Image (cartoon, grey):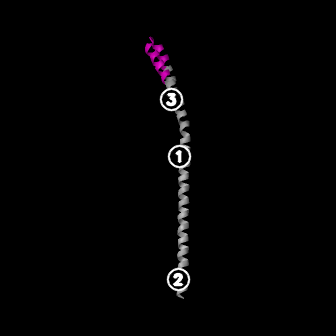
Amino acid sequence: MIGWIILGALVLIIFFLIGVYNSLVRLKVQCDNAWADIDVQLKRRYDLIPNLVETVKGYAGHEKGTLEAVINARNRAMTATSPGGHRKFHLAAEFAVGDRR
């Protein structure tokens, strides 16, 4: 009778150890998958950087053109001699910055 109890206890301990081992393997696989997901997200982010740089370059070019148009309109308005000339160049400056009322 004692032999059956010891054998049963050993079988339970073996099943317990197998369960613990399987749980640890499952957790390791989940951890590896999580790190792989992080790597994928970082790769996507790094792949988007050149697109962002090109977008900023395009916007900077637009801003440069707008700034030059405003400066030119301001300079012409400063050199205008008549009130009508001031109004004309004021409207040109508003148009250059996009203030269209």
Above or below, 33 relative to 49 = below
Q: Residues within 10 Å of mark 1 (few under 14, many from 20)?
A: few
List the single residue furthest toward the bottom: 1
State the separation of the CA atoms marked 3 and 2.
Answer: 80 Å
Badge 3 crowding class, 10 Å Cα cut-off, few under 14, some 14 to 19, many 20 or more, is: few
Q: Secondary structure at mark 1?
A: helix
Q: Nearer the viewer, mark 3 or mark 2?
A: 2
Q: CA distance from mark 2 to mark 1?
A: 54 Å
State how far apart marks 1 and 3 are (Cα). 27 Å
Q: Which residue is mark 2?
A: 6
Q: Which mark is residue 60?
A: 3
Q: Are marks 3 and 2 in contact (CB under 8 Å)?
A: no
Q: Contact, CB < 8 Å: mark 2 with mark 1?
A: no
Residue 36 part of the magenta-drawn span: no
Look at the image and give the residue range highlighted in magenta: 67-90
**Nearer-the-camera pick, 91 or 59:** 59
The residue to which callout 1 is attached is 42
Determine the residue located farthest toward the front in the rendered image: 3
The answer to if 79 sits in the magenta stretch is yes
Mark positioned earlier in the residue sequence (1 or 3): 1
